[in-house]
Image (cartoon, rainbow, N blue to C red):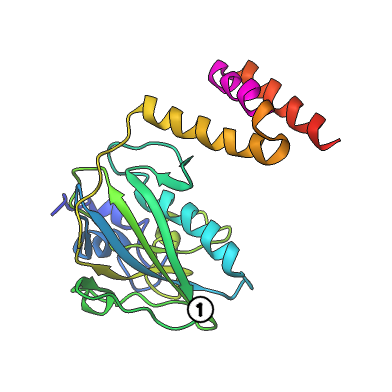
Amino acid sequence: MGRRRPRSEQQTEVGDLGCPGVDVWEWMQQNRAPMFPSKTNRWVLLRSLNDGADDNTVRTTCQAVLAKWFEDVAAWDPIGETAGMTRVGPADNLNIKQVSSERIKLDPRAARREDVGYPPVPVLASGPWASVELEFDWRSHVEWIPWAVWHSGMAALKSTRRCPTDADWILDQVGTPLVESPPELSQLEKGGKIVEETAEVVKEAAGDVVRWVVVPLALLGAAGTAVYLAAKRKLRS
């Protein structure tokens, strides 16, 4: 368990300032979500739809909230796209498998929100909601994080963002991993994937002849990118 905060720190996280009746820092330390290094982690999240979000918005904001939850974890990397998959910090090959209006149940499960040991049990804000199933390869040695909850909007206090009551996002279930993570791609391999994807974009726009002229320019950094975009605009004009 982590260190216990001095009383002066606790006063900024308790009561009406952020989360009435809940010591948020203590709640986060006591309620932990298991993480499985070098394995494909399986999660189900619940997301409030009080903002009217559609399926695409749920998927996009899912990446953003994961970045918030993982920002304090070692081995942090920025969000990036590789071969159609997303990396969010140490969560590699993020795959949002489905968004459903029904509660998705993982089997087998390693943990679920109803079993958190330090009250209260995290709950969404009342109203419509969606269930989100996702998988990612955990590229960190960290074996737990605070049970994930998040409040969106303009809240400034961390205690408000992490308050487990009336939340906009909550971790509902953690599945038991079923497979090992694939080997992590090197930077050179990732670069090759990007070139392949660029080739497909150009091929769709102009065919194989232009493909072999433009794709090598992607390896030249900013200059290559500028030429590529100019060629793409020319082809569409």
Residue nearer the viewer, 96 or 215: 215
Which quadrant would residue 55 be assigned to in this image? Answer: bottom right
Q: Is residue 16 visible?
A: no
Q: Is residue 215 magenta?
A: yes
Say what amino acid the circle numbered 1 marks: Trp
Residue at the disc numbered 1: 129
Residue nearer the viewer, 227 or 96: 227
Q: Is residue 232 above or below residue 38?
A: above
Compared across the picture, whether 97 is left or right of 54 comes to left
Compared across the picture, whether 42 is left or right of 177 comes to right
Residue nearer the viewer, 14 or 155: 155
Q: Is residue 235 above or below residue 162?
A: above
Q: Is residue 151 magenta?
A: no
Picture residue at 64% right of the left edge, 16% below the top? 223
Q: Is residue 199 above or below residue 87?
A: above
Whole-percent x, y for residue 129 in the image: 51, 78
Picture residue at 17% right of the left edge, 52% below the top? 143
